[in-house]
Image (cartoon, grey):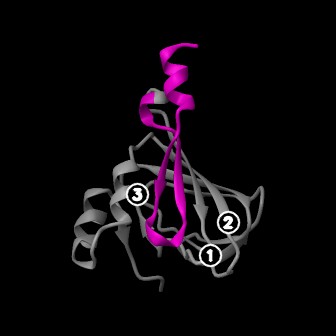
Amino acid sequence: MTQQTAEHTASRLIRLGASGSTIEVLASPGDTDGTLSLYRWRLAPSSRGPAPHFHTTFSETFVVEEGQVDFFDGATWRALGPGDTAFSARGSVHGLRKDRDEPATVLMVLAPGVRREDYFAQLATAGEADMERLHAEHDNHFVDEG
């Protein structure tokens, strides 16, 4: 097994606070020569997901593996179930929410690859006063839904 393959198969699990939600790092930019990042997000029953926002440096693709989530495309919300995919281009407003009390699992593909591990880990422990700085540092720009 090559070193690159060993790094790729060694995933990292990030716990998102007390909710029980986790993010598993499946591929970082170093694994894909910067082409993409791949994360598996397991949303606990109480998790709700991020409000509408956009990113200036990367696009995101979401693939639902289990459960049901709603995707906001900048204009309307639509339900996504297992096997459904949603794409948000760089600069496009999008959001993800889970209104149901069941868990859900979503694959997130970021292109080009962006290291989000520190951002996800800090979300779990950041106080309300630090959130604006944290979001700005990690290219998350929240907007009103309307």
At x 46%, y 63%, the residue is: 16
Query: In the picture provided, is 127 more to the left or to the right than 86?
Result: left
**CA separation in Å, label 1 and label 3:** 18 Å
Report the residue marked by disc 3.
Answer: 120
The magenta segment: 1-30
Residue 15 colored magenta?
yes
Above or below, 82 relative to 113 = below
What amino acid type is highlighted by mark number 1? Lys
Which amino acid type is marked by label 3? Phe
Asked where in the image residue 128 lies, by quadrant, the reply is bottom left
* Local SS, label 2: strand
In the rendered structure, does residue 20 fall within the stretch colored magenta?
yes
Mark 2 or 3, nearer chain start: 2
Q: Which residue is mark 1?
A: 98
Residue 80 image label: none
Find disc 2 in the rendering and name its residue. Answer: 104
| CB under 8 Å between discs 2 and 3 | no
